Amino acid sequence: MARLLSVNVGLPRNITWKDRTVRTGIWKAPVHGRCRVGRLNLDGDGQGDLNGHGGEQRAVFVYQIDSYHYWQKQLNRTDFVHGQFGENFTVEGLPDDAVCIGDRYQIGSAVFEVTQPRVTCYRVGIRTNEPKMPALLTSSGRPGFYFRVLSEGEVGAGDEIVKVGEATERMTIAEINALLYSPDHPRDRLERALRIGALSPGWRSSFEALLQSRTSDAGGSGNAGLAPAAAAHPAAPGFRALVVASIDREAVDVVSLSLQHPDHEPLPLPLPGQYLVLRLPKTDDSPLIRSYSLSGPQSTENYRISVKIEPGGAAGSYLRDHVRAGDVLEVSSPRGGFILQSRERPVVLLSAGIGATPVLAMLHALAATRSTRQIFWLHAARDGQHHPFADEVRRLMLALPRGRSFVCYSRPDSRDKLGKDFDAPGHLSRPLFEDIGIPREADVYLCGPARFMADMKQALAAFGTTSERIHLELFNGGESLIPGIVGAAMRAPHPPKDATDSGPLVSFARSGIAAHWKPSAYTSILELAEACDVPVRWSCRTGVCHNCESGLVSGAVAYDPPPLDKPAEGNLLICCSQPVQDVIIDL
């Protein structure tokens, strides 16, 4: 007979971890007496990170006493108490290799349904004082599982757990867990999992992505169900030598370089919105590694990049002062996940300054097919002298039957003609979105300076555009994902305080930072990136969740611990990797 051994609750608290403050609800303590179960929570319980825990599909976390015994033996521990794994229900008799998604149980006066395995994160490692615990839970097939609440009621320790229903399609927690996290993702089993109506939406979308990757012509390696959007289009590591075919001035501070293969061999076809990484000659001890968006039409014959020459900018100044037509540059394959989606929804290409470059490539792609979608080109510039690609955009818009352009100049000068060179003085804003007639269901592709991006995100949210419709390109690295970290200050990337002059050189391409690897100071490339304040994404820190998956522009790494499922070829997991030679990483 299955029984509820302990009901455990706890409200979020702040703890200190690695000199940081973490907000977490993983500390749970047993309830004495009976406890009310609501649709989203137990009385007295809460979650510190609602993106990863809690909500209707993850209202109650369940863990088995048999797994407690397993871990006590494996880890030689005797100090575990009920709630040690962050579970709300410590149970006897519901093992992960027997309980199935969609199983329904009555406990006390409440009824529950199994929705998904637990997704482990670094905080369970903190709670158990075992940093590898996220990987151990997942690889062992003992992750535990979540209930959603079908009928609210009261529960208490000692209650019998009575099975009252099950799904037609039978797949256990252990099977579902392995299907996502192990390297084996058979198509028939993915299809079976997707037939289970009770499976939570998050896991469903992961299996749909895996199934699509198995059935698409692209195929490919890696785990499409886990890889973040920024790592979804991996490219082969390494650089090729390309010749500068021409250099053109686009504005007072912007130049474009057209690049070709020296023997006119075909180049990899870029996706609209992607960028190239350039490795320029060394300055002092480090090469200049910079990323530049492709700004021209899709082509296998030549690539066009456009560069803003910033005052004091080392790479831009080098390209302006030293590079001429006929010179050879080291260039990566096209990469990046900021790409035009093949949908029929309206498109808004929203940019400022040099942020026009990736969305200009998207405009080229739309114009090449004479797209009949609603397409809005919205751009902000200082004045006509600082407005690159103005004539080019006007020509492209003529090919779009439902296209509309709107340009704002913040400081137009006497040579700029209202109605001809620009449409309004000032800045792009929410009221302008209303006036222009942007559909709220449009896909918005946004790129520009940091302040502009923040203002536009806020304006779009107020306008009613949902976050999943807003696609961002950040020139100086991506958006961070540091779950539960409280008060993390956003600092400009910088060399680490304990910089050394030996060891493999780790270059963060998008942040413009390079530092030598110091194994005595760091256990992973993630820790080095954190020491440099390079924007990073992570959750498990042990090679399970793939949130940290990033592009490997060049070089090679080793893994410790080894990831449960390898990243795609051309990518790496920074949370558990170490450089074995100089590496360049797409961060």
Image: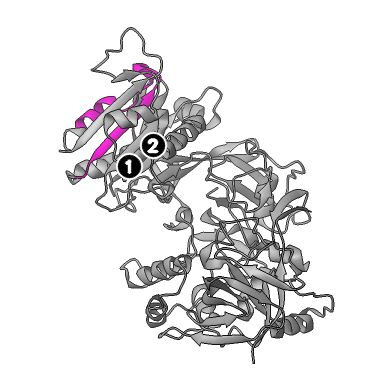
Q: CA distance from mark 1 to mark 2?
A: 7 Å
- The amino acid type found where label 2 is placed reads Phe
**In x, y percent, where is residue 184?**
48, 79
Q: Quadrant of residue 541?
A: bottom right
Please name the residue shown 49% across and 61% down the image.
227
Which residue corresponds to mark 1? Answer: 440
Residue 227 visible in the snapshot: yes
Would you place residue 572 above or below residue 375 in this image? below
Of residue 85 and residue 321, the one placed in the foreground of this image is 85
Which residue corresponds to mark 2? Answer: 463
Residue 378 is one of the magenta-drawn residues: yes
| Residues in magenta, as a range | 373-395
**In x, y percent, where is residue 314?**
55, 30
Of residue 354 and residue 18, the one placed in the foreground of this image is 18
**In x, y percent, where is residue 428?**
38, 27
Of residue 177 and residue 583, the one placed in the foreground of this image is 177
- The amino acid type found where label 1 is placed reads Arg
